[in-house]
Amino acid sequence: MSAANTITYREAMREAIREALRRDDRVFLMGEDVGAYGGCFAVSLGLLEEFGPERVRDTPLSEAAFVGAGIGAALGGMRPIVEIMTVNFSLLALDQILNNAATLLHMSGGQLNVPLVIRMTTGAGRQLAAQHSHSLEGWYAHIPGLRILAPATVEDARGMLWPALEDPDPVLIFEHGSLYGVSGQPGPGQVDITSAALRRSGKDVTLIAYGGTTGKALAAADVLSAEGTEADVVDLRVLRPLDDATIMESVGRTHRAVIVDEGWRSGGLSAEIGIRIAEQAFYQLDAPIQRVCTAEVPIPYARHLEEAALPQVPSIVAAAREAVAS
Amino acid sequence: MTALRQVAPDMDPAALPRDADIRDALELDSLDFLTYVQTLSESGGCRIEEDDYPAFATIAGGADFLAAHARA
Amino acid sequence: MAGKKSARAESHRDLLRQMLRIRRFEERCVELYSGEKIRGFMHLYIGEEAVAVGVSHALTADDVVVSTYREHGHALIRGVPATTIMAEMYGKATGCSRGRGGSMHLFDVARRFYGGNAIVGGGLPLAVGLALADKMQDRNRVTVCFFGDGAVAEGEFHECLNLAALWRLPVLFACENNLYAMGTALARSHAQTDLALRAAGYGVAAWPVDGMDVLAVADAAARAAEAIRAGAGPHLVESRTYRFRAHSMYDPDRYRSKQEIEQWKKRDPIDALVASMKAEREITDDDLAVLEKEISEEIDHAVAFAEQAPVEPVEDLSRFVYSETSETSGRARVGPVEAAS
Amino acid sequence: MNERAEFVMPSLGADMESGTVAEWLVKPGDRIRRGDVVAVIDTDKAMIEVESFHTGTVESLLVGTGRRVPVGTALAVITGAPPAAEPVSPEAVSPEAVPASPEKRAARPRRLPSAPGAPHAPAPVASPLVRHLAEQRGVDIARLRGTGPQGRVTRADVEHAEPAPEARVSPLARGLAARLGVDLAGVHGTGRGGAIRAQDVREAAERGAGPPPPEAVEEAARPPAEPAGARAVPGADQERRREAMRQAIARAMARSKREIPHYYLSTTVDLTRALAWLRERNHDLPVSRRLLPAALLLKAAARAAAEVPRLNGFWVDDAFVPGEAVHLGVAISLRGGGLIAPALHDAARLELEDLMAALKDLVARARAGRLRGAEMTEATITVTNLGDQGVEAVHGVIYPPQVALVGFGKIVDRPWAVDGLLGVRPLVTCTLAADHRATDGYTGGRFLGILGRLLDRPETL
């Protein structure tokens, strides 16, 4: 079925970690169940055996302590990769991420950079209910001092980690839980961690998505194409700092924008992107900006309720139709 | 004829031989010619492809094309 | 015999000198705060000097210190110049954090001073991580983390004690138990007020010590540091102390009695050391006067430095949010410790 | 309290020394706004609608129709309205708007207001009080039928009027309408709630710019003895105008060759990709939305001028003054002889489709003698395309005070070496005539290089 060099997103991420551990002995992985268990989502399966418990460190369930220790180790010259099981759990370490990782460089007048990578799972779609399913990357994208990545493809899962480790500042990588089993080409290697990518070209409307919604936006673009509407699909890739140029270039061509965000609508990333378009491309707009976001509820368990809460292909298609019609 | 008068108001298309090249005879430029074809396409309710443009170089050719392609 | 005795006297003079530097420096800060030269929150260490001075006495220049927002004293005796500390409190460009930190956020990486952390308990994980890096890179250093009794109630304290013990990391947990978390007395916030006992639950060796006696603190810290360097894992020293002044300049000090404060002031660590040194004939009044004069000149110099220091241009407001190396030289790799040393 | 301002015979080109009022579109007592078209001026080259730089009331007309007067002659007096009702904006009375000497005016291109909408009907008369009331109630007084004496709008008219519904216009459509000179009031919106979208404006521009209705043409073609339509020029007059235009062109071109040390460069560009792309693009579109190769050539020239700003602007008082944007002069030959080069406003930023619409509109209006003043003066660089005449290369004369002229020849199939093999390719010869005072051959070469590259990547245009 799949081509010889096709791998899953999970494997791509594992390969990236393996490569980093091999390339640089300052790199180590730590987090809950990354070692003996093989990672909650099996990303780090086999790495303990290969690299030993010093460099693949199981931690106690102490998010604040091990995320903070990652920051301290980065200050001490290491290049830690800290895995947090899900974005909901990251809130236990939010103090360390915001008050230390993102802040130390500025607060110390440029003396302390924090070359740390934090990986975590985000997003819904697996019936994990309201404490394992949220998309809070937009919150993190609010924080100056952080770089926020959302790999949506196997190539990005494979290629983003190394440049993230080379970044002298803290980088958070959000891996959408629904993507781990997706297969694709890992690509030639390194990718940039600065720009958005145009995943599909069309002249009628721009669909802006990232992470778990990129695939849905592409599927929506297929549906739209069959109706004669050609959509540009922008995969943001980097949620902070946002690549305004790519967004504006696309909206400047299509004059219509639909923002797809699995985060909640109010005060979220979609609002930020929407207002940037209004600020920078107002005179290019030929229709009101549309948003497709998660319903403003904690993610429910039951499948039909969860599906109804999330952005889906039909809702993206409907929003695009509205943009083209209005 | 009306279409031609629009683009070349100073000429009398009625005096043209039906097989003369109207672009030369009426000194039409490419924009004029496009306007001419557009007018015929809209008034004749008939789709004219770019490949068909050469047929319209003469009045006879244009008339034949329209007669053949006009809506039933 | 005479040599040993004079070495002891020299050591005592140094301890006294450091405590006096902190005391006089902070007294000047109060004056400057009242004169609106220093703003923001300012937390004074007066009364607790024996803790910082005693613990630091056990450290080498290579060791690392992570501190709290009551850190003027820690910074001073770790070698951060009084000039750059004062300039920082003035909010000036030549301050040790370029005016971005103020009183609560003094940093000096060259002196391995990893800052004033103003989130109670927030510095503990950093210290654990710094020690982890040392261990993974086979550097025989001690990382000292100062924190107060308030932090012991935070989850991060427990997570960090556990993690440091689990991984046998070279951390000296230096608890400054001044009996009040801001205005909440120890007994009103802790079910077990014997804080050293908490450490026992994590298998961490811990000693309570009289924090008003600099020699006792220095002795306990030296023992702990020695054990840590020998690979015995983290240790905790709980110094029982008292701040003579209110929590911060805004604090009306309503939660404790005048009598209680006066009682503690009778145990002033500086007076105590001076008395013992005089009894041992290690110091004369003339010596003391010379010492005071030297310190006064150091502080005068620091104030003059801060007064004339330039302010950071507003155009530079958004500097140091992201590393400038990443913007200018692309993907340059910067190890902050190495770069600074 | 009232400001008085003169409406003067404008200079609409370096070669214009005098003009004739062909028609007044306002009469004493009319309210006018800055940007309203108030008169049609015969410049020898064309009939040009001229806008007012003032807001106020026409007090008197000083020059009757048919009188030829020098540039700078006062033609009408405009009195400002009381500030309470309509503050006169400072720029409306700034000296910039009323240049001191014809020489200065001719030499220094001014920033002109963006192209106004289609000619407005004379504004209805109303008292300041009534105007104030109308403003307060959001009533567009221009849309009211006055019931007072001589059609004056009364207080009751305003009070009975429905407030004008807020037009829903997309930002893109609004900008496009301004660029294409489309009056939004006449555009039918097809979006939700009647919102006007870009395509609606394009279609409106298309209609507005299209050829005049046959009746008008017939009327214009009638023998001169018969009474002519408002703007039709009697035959004898036409002859005179043709002669005058010849003279004007002669003056401008002689000045150019006298003053401007021209240098000439040329390059040949393979249009295979451009034409294939155009063909693909035009394939599914109705004739009205198809692009001509000329649109690609013009867009590429405008983009290249934007990238080489030293060629886009004016040589004034022994110095180069860069253009604020690329306003692309398009040389249009008039039927019956003569040449005129009005500008496509901000052409480098127009999308191809809009550029095509603007071009059609411009050519139609140029030939109908209905250009606007700004279009005659604002060109920052000019393109001449003689390809339709079968000419292969144009070595043009620069239109002063511009510093460059771009020429395109006929697109011809010729043998052309590609990757070491000989093939037949559609080629076009692009030429540049440039002012050696402003630039050197290197700059000109860069321009042609960029032009060639742009034409090879039509999808980026």
Image: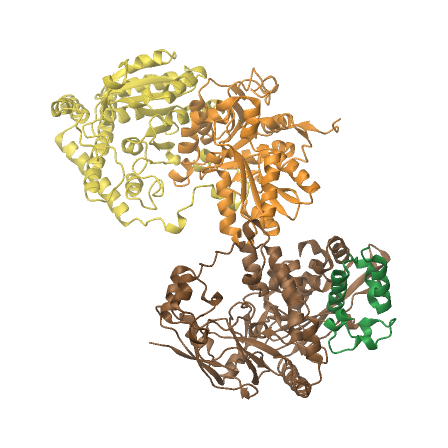
**Hue of chain C?**
yellow
Q: Which of A49 and A179 is in front in this view?
A: A179
Residue at 76% x, 58% y is: B45
Q: Which of C330 and A318 is in front in this view?
A: A318
Which quadrant of the view contains residue B66? bottom right
Colouring method of the image: by chain
In the rendered image, which quarter contains the N terminus of chain A? top right
Which quadrant of the view contains residue C198? top left
Q: Nearer the viewer, residue D111 or C148?
A: D111
Q: The brown chain is which one?
A: D
Q: Is residue C137 left or right of residue D206?
A: left
**Hue of chain B?**
green
Residue at 50% x, 73% y is: D122
In this rendering, the answer to whether D337 lies above or below A218 is below
Residue C196 seen in render: yes
Q: Where is residue B8 in the image (x, y as percent from the top left)?
A: 74, 74
Q: Is residue C245 left or right of residue D386?
A: left
Q: In this view, does C275 lie to the left or right of C96?
A: left
Q: Nearer the viewer, residue C13 or D4?
A: D4
Which quadrant of the view contains residue D94? bottom left
Q: Which chain is orange?
A: A
Residue at 60% x, 45% y is: A206
